[in-house]
Image: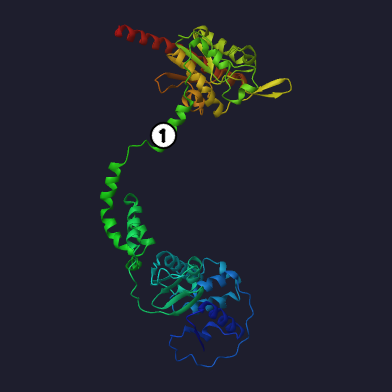
Amino acid sequence: MRHIALPDTGTADAWRKAARACLREGLSPADVSWGTAQTERSLFDDQPIAGAAPVKMTVPRSFVSLAETVCWHSDADRFARLYAFLWRLKDTPHLIADRGDRELAHLRAMEKSVHRCQHKMKAFVRFREIGDRDDLRRSFAAWFEPTHHTVEPTADFFARRFADMDWRIVTPEKSAIFQDGSLSFAPGQPKPALPEDAGEALWLTYFRSIFNPARLKVQAMTSEMPKKYWKNLPEAATIPDLIANAPARARAMAQAAPTLPPVRAGKARQQLAAHMSAWDGPKEALPAAIYACTRCPLHRTATQAVPGVGPLDAALMIVGEQPGDQEDLTGLPFVGPAGQLFDKVAQSAGLNRAEAFVTNAVKHFKFTPRGKRRLHQRPNSGEIEHCRWWLDAERSLVQPKLILALGATAAEALTGSGSNILRRRGTVEQLADGTPVLLSVHPSFLLRLPDPAERQKQMALFEADLRRAVEMVVALTARSGRQDMAAG
């Protein structure tokens, strides 16, 4: 059996060279015992080894990276584990990617443990000045107790970060010394007597100030800052007191905090306020203001805006989608094929259109030119939001007792949602000011139905909706009259 004693410094490079030499001699893992200068040799280390064929293999790059890290683990068997896995790789190179391999999983866990120890060393080393502050290169020293042999592989990090000063990190096993720009290593030594740091009190004050008792999670905190490091961290002396007083401080913070609206509710109110109509001109000026509207790009292609028409004291407001081709040319709502169908059904239902205020959710015609034709395009949510400015102004002016919303666009403009209109048709929803909205389909929907039977069915439902609108207006008007008499 061949015994290989690796040095304490440059261990990873030494293992790689030794492993390569063992492969050249064809030594199996059973032929080699690995250790360091401090490892005691066994009785079998000097046994003769039978000759074997040299091994030629290409080592995967990921294994080289794995080995360079695992070599710094504290496990005494780390070198033998690495060589045994390397020996298996010569016949099965894909093994390095096999997550189900138990030995590879063990090596990966060791790699992760070394990386974690390096991270803690970078985070928890606390330097104290040991030289004269007036020296050209100030001198510092720190005491640290790593879990693994991570002083050497982590020293380059400190050399890059503190290149303008001399420093040393002392540990029980090895010390890293950086002097005049050169990095070297020395044997470990007991904890030195480091001087007090004048800035330590300031650091403790800062640490207390950034501690948020309302977000305290003790388990997570001790996971990131294990208690084994506390004895060398000056701020750790404050942690027990901060944890003990955290509940009381959190309650005091909550009581002293100003009352704020929920963030989402605040944003919703801002959006609502931005789209709420602020038009406050005389009622005669409202149509002219709508004609002059440039709140969205639809005004650039439409012939004109189409405001609502009807008595300003109407008990019923009928809201459609947007002007069609004929409405855009005439400047009047509901005069095209859909409007004519509405008039026909309304007459059957006993609804007198002349007594209602008829308008649209969007005031300009949206279309796509196709030759000489202008094909209707449904307004998007942004255009509906912009035009709600004028719809709210008309509602404020008319103050109807009931609104009949025809189609998804009208439903979205009034209730905020235009979805599932067929399922919601015939239902009544309340606006924020209490105005009831009866939902139904748009007459153009009836015109587009190809199946005569289905169209007849939907026509009957539409007529029922209009009949219900008439009944509701009568009931609401009667109730309002009784309330006025009671108030008088």
Residue 369: x and y in percent read 70, 24
Q: For mark 1, what is the residue?
A: 266
**Viewed as shown, does residue 173 lie left or right of 290?**
left
Q: In which quarter of the image is residue 303?
A: top right
Q: Which residue is drawn at 51% across and 28% down?
A: 420
Q: Can residue 48 be seen in this view?
A: yes
**Viewed as shown, does residue 172 lie left or right of 34?**
left
Q: Which of 486 and 296 is in front in this view?
A: 296
Q: Residue furthest front?
A: 134
Q: Residue at x 38, y 77 (%)?
A: 172
Quadrant including the C terminus = top left
* 464 shown above or below 239: above
Q: Nearer the viewer, residue 58 or 207?
A: 207
Q: What residue type is labelled 1?
A: Gly
Residue 293: x and y in percent read 57, 20
Q: Is mark 1 on a helix, strand or loop?
A: helix
Other-residue count near label 1 (Cα within 10 Å), few / some / many at <14 / 14–19 / ≥20: few
Q: How many marks?
A: 1
Q: In which quarter of the image is residue 140?
A: bottom left
Q: Is residue 378 visible?
A: no
Residue 249: x and y in percent read 27, 49
